[in-house]
Amino acid sequence: MARISVIGSGTWGMALSILLNSNNHEVVVWSALPEEVEMLKTKREHNNLPGVKIPENIEITGDLEYAVKSGELLVLSVPSVYTRQTARKMREYVADGQIIVNVAKGIEEDTLMTLTEQIEEEIPQADVAVLSGPSHAEEVSRGIPTTCVTGAKTKKTAEYIQNIFMRDNFRVYTSPDVLGIELGGSLKNVIALAAGVADGLGYGDNTKAALITRGLAEIVRLALKMGANAETLYGLSGMGDLIVTCASMHSRNRRAGILIGQGKSMQEAMDEVHMVVEGVYSAKAALALSRKYDVNMPIVDAINKVLFENKSASEAVNHLMTRDKSIENQRLPWNE
């Protein structure tokens, strides 16, 4: 049994807290919002996880120093746009070698750094790892069978995290490819926005399959240029997470995309979803990375035009469909 502090009380943080509590770990959850601390303490239920009870022995606190210092393992579960500033606040309390598992997904727009890179920059004394995969909080909190992958610099750290999280309904694999895991987890949100836009336009399964398949091709091209492993992107944190995020109504990125496809602005869509839509924040970063590494990413380019340049969704789809002819896989040779 370990003492674990979950930094961030959103749906994913709470779902993992319930999971870890089920594994007989002592769990402390930190929230930056005093009113949320009080609500979670009294209601023992998260507003966005209705019907899911938070066990009484999960401790809720607004004291960051207490949360960080009392956890053998820290699970960082704040929205990606708050990862750096939260890590900066945590830095003075983190012990040398303390393990921090990032479970959020995103890329910093200004620096183009992944979340683990940001955490390592802000907390250099920490042992930073990642946990990712096709894992909606709404399902994990209810014990629905789920698989994820944890990435770390050392096999020892990855296996430690695997043992902490693993249970009969939550299977965890290990991987040394932290970069690949993070790229898959963040870039799939951008493709999911595009898939949602297609749904909002009333398109069908053919369109969804095309976006998932060609979206994965774009992610793999970029990831390889950046030094990640293609096998990672064909695994849980790439293809697996991409499928679930593009197909499920639990996905806030898909839901926001649907609203945009129906004619709402980016801001109107985000306001209606009522949660952080990570793909909106990752879209610009993904486009910047494609240009930095000279990688062709037409779907990423199209969704940026819809989000930030007022291009109509139907026009963006038409542009994607009428681009110059191409072959599917540039690396496959002809026999002639």
Image (spheres, grey):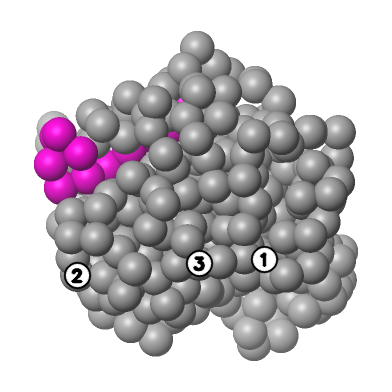
Is residue 333 or residue 11 the one in the foreground?
11
User: Residue 154 in the image: x percent, y percent?
Assistant: 13, 41
Q: Is residue 14 above or below residue 240?
A: below
Residue 319 lies left or right of residue 124; in this view the side is: right
Residue at 47 percent of width and 61 percent of height = 66
Tag 1: amino acid = Val
Tag 3: amino acid = Leu
Residue at 41 percent of width and 59 percent of height = 68
Residue at 77 percent of width and 79 percent of height = 267
> Is disc 1 in contact with disc 3, using a CB cutoff of under 8 Å?
no
| Residue tagged 1 | 276
Tag 2: amino acid = Pro
> Is disc 1 in contact with disc 2, using a CB cutoff of under 8 Å?
no
Residue 128 lies left or right of residue 283; in this view the side is: left
Q: Does the magenta segment cover residue 74?
A: no
Q: Earlier in the sequence, mark 1 or mark 3?
A: 3
Q: Do we see residue 192 in this rendering? A: no
Question: Badge 1 local density, few (<14 within 10 Å), some, or many (20+)?
Answer: some
Name the image quarter holding residue 160.
Answer: top left
The magenta segment: 146-157
Numbered label attached to residue 64: 3
Question: Badge 2 local density, few (<14 within 10 Å), some, or many (20+)?
Answer: some
Q: Is residue 116 above or below residue 3?
A: below
User: Residue 251 in the image: x percent, y percent?
Assistant: 69, 47
Is residue 153 or residue 38 the one in the foreground?
38
Q: Quadrant of the N terminus?
A: top left
